[in-house]
Image (cartoon, rainbow, N blue to C red):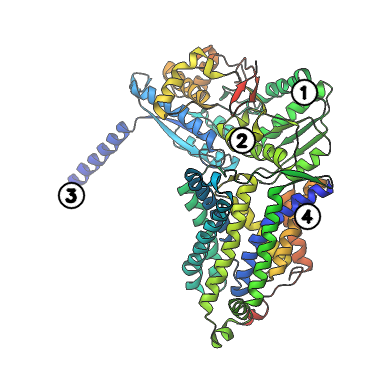
Amino acid sequence: MRDKLFTVLTILAAAAFLGTAAHAATLKLGVAGPLTGDQAAFGEMLKNGATLAVEEWNAKGGVKVGKKKMKVDILWGDDRHDPREGVSIAHKFVNSGAAGIVGHFNSSVSIPASTVYAEAGVVQITPASTNPKLTEQGFSTVFRVCGRDDQQGEVAANYIVDKLKLKRIAILHDKTTYGQGLADETKRFLEKRGVKPVFYSGVVQGDKDYTPVLTAAKQKNPELVYFGGIHPEAILLVKQMRERLGMKAHFMSGDGIVTDEYYKIAGKSAEGTYITFTPDQTKLAAAQNVIKNHRKRFGKEVGAYTIYSYVATNMILSAIQATGSTNGSKLSAHLRSKPWNTSLGKLQFNKKGDVLESPYVLWQVKGSKFVEIK
Amino acid sequence: MFAQQLVNGLVVGAVYALIALGYTLVYGILQLINFAHGEIYMIGAYVGIAVLAVLGTMGLTQTSLALSIVLVFLIPMIYCAAYGITLERVAYRPLRNAPRLSPLISAIGMSLFLQNYVQVVQGARDKAFPNLLELGSFQLFGAYVNGLQIFILVLALGLMAALQLFIKKTKLGKAMRATAQDRTMASLVGVNVNRVIAVTFAIGSVLAAVAGVMVGMYYGIVNHHIGFVAGMKAFTAAVLGGIGNVTGAFLGGFLLALLESFWAGYVSAVYKDVFAFMVLVVVLIFRPEGILGGSGGEADRT
């Protein structure tokens, strides 16, 4: 009798397990970036873009893997733009069986995390990490839908030399993989064009007072200050240049400062800032649907990286549906196999995982708005 | 460049000095490093933003600038004083007779708690501190000087003078000095030690609140973790000047900021913070009691 009871209990327990297993048959997608902290503005773009894409898939019943439709479940990872945090999130994602990763945001986090994903054979598409090294490591699982800093640096350098016709350039960076990488690329292309920067220095990320280093830069009478870094530091730099030191030099930076917070907090000082970024997405015909749905869902306009995150999420989920598999090498092969029609227009990956064409253009802050320079 | 770096350093020094006073006052009386002090400064900045937001919607910032400036400092001062007193009551008073390590751990715990509390309530993002004082700038010995910088310096020096007067001339100040010298003896001659300690925390917090609002005005940006670095720097400044010594803390604040400013300007901006803490290490090796010497010695006997 006791034995029988035990058998029944075992069967019941097993059934219960089966029940939960069947219930939990969701497709897990890891989404990671700086969801909190001083770069949370970017985290929110990532979050909203991925949420929008996943909700659309789930509304249609989910992703079809083989014969079964599976709902998508997002695993969130808040790396707070800290590389160590990013790696531990990567391990967590891999251990929880994530089928693909959208992220991370910052190059300094994406690069170490990509090693973890590559080892586990999990596909990773970053919407924003632009440091060349990310796709130069030779991992087949790494992709990015944004451009690269060597492209961005070249556009910046050419604009300074050809259009602005400036010779005295000061270069600052925040010592991160992204910031210093971008600053160094810009410096390299400037030197190629015969312009040797008059000042070059790193600054401490998270510091509040940059007047000492700006004072040193001011001694060299720069006509333009170029900054490789993210908006929290860019805001302080441009404010202190204008308000504390009365510097009239132009200010130029890259795609790391494209958030409303930049001109909202820096105010008047931000006016006239030059930025290298991709052409205005909101004018793309393909993007109109996302923009409309985003407004409806979140009650606000898309940010610089919202559509990139949306596209990256969609690509992973479509690849899973098309191959009927979550196997990393199958997915990467599929992602590389064809041009994709996305909300950012046609995108195709090369062997490294970079998009074939990614034209950077110049933007400027005008009247508390980012405006593309025609 | 020298004059400009001097100006840069003096303004930061004023902030360090005001926060350092809070560390040194508490240390002088309790031999306790109040590591939650940096958070009080951060809370001061946040309250400043809230006050400005309210004044802004009332339209007071347009109609009466002077009153707005007074309120934007006064309300955070009151608020932070309450925080300081509560902090002492909750986290330190119950541990008054515990081993010295216990209140230290309690302080670190309070620091973490306050930081996370503000993050939860106010969000993790940077907050803009609205522009209240639009002051002009002028050139002085080749340095570009802003009216706000002068305002900050004058305010800090004024508060320092007021604090010295308070400690030297008032009855409560005398009680503070007595408590610092010997807590048991002071209580025996009728000093209400608990009250003196509460007042000390309140004064330190008031100064931190002023520093917080100043920093908000000066940089225009505030977040929940500004208290940590500022607290470390101010603590360094207090040790540099001689912890427990009021004039020393003030001097240490300016000295540290000037060293940082010149180092970043002439040598390397990359290792600015490293240099600040290197100075601390060197001072601790060669002059452990700080430049002006601490004042905690006698009280150590209790």
SS of the residue under disc 2? helix
Q: Quadrant of the C terminus of chain B?
A: bottom right
Say if residue B38 shows up in the picture.
no
Instruction: Measure the alpha-carbon separation of dots 1 and 3.
Output: 81 Å
Q: Quadrant of the N terminus of chain B?
A: top right
SS of the residue under disc 3? helix
B190 in relation to A38, above or below? below
Q: Which residue is mark 3?
A: A2
| Mark seen at residue B210 | none
Query: Given the image, on which type of amino acid does mark 1 rest?
Result: Phe
Instruction: Measure the alpha-carbon separation of dots 4 and 3.
Output: 81 Å
Q: Which residue is mark 2?
A: A267
Residue found at x 50% / y 20%: A330
Instruction: Measure the alpha-carbon separation of dots 2 and 3.
Output: 78 Å
Q: Are marks 2 and 3 on the same chain?
A: yes
Q: Which residue is mark 4?
A: B259
Q: In the rendered image, which quarter is residue A188 located in?
A: top right
Q: Which residue is mark 1?
A: A189
For discs 1 and 2, the disc positioned in front in the rendered view: 2
The numbered mark, 1 or 2, whose residue comes first in the sequence reads 1
Tell me if label 2 and label 4 are in contact, CB under 8 Å: no
Tell me if label 1 and label 2 are in contact, CB under 8 Å: no
Q: In the rendered image, which quarter is residue A171 located in?
A: top right
Tell me if label 2 and label 3 are in contact, CB under 8 Å: no
The chain carrying label 2 is A
Query: Given the image, on which type of amino acid does mark 2 rest?
Result: Gly
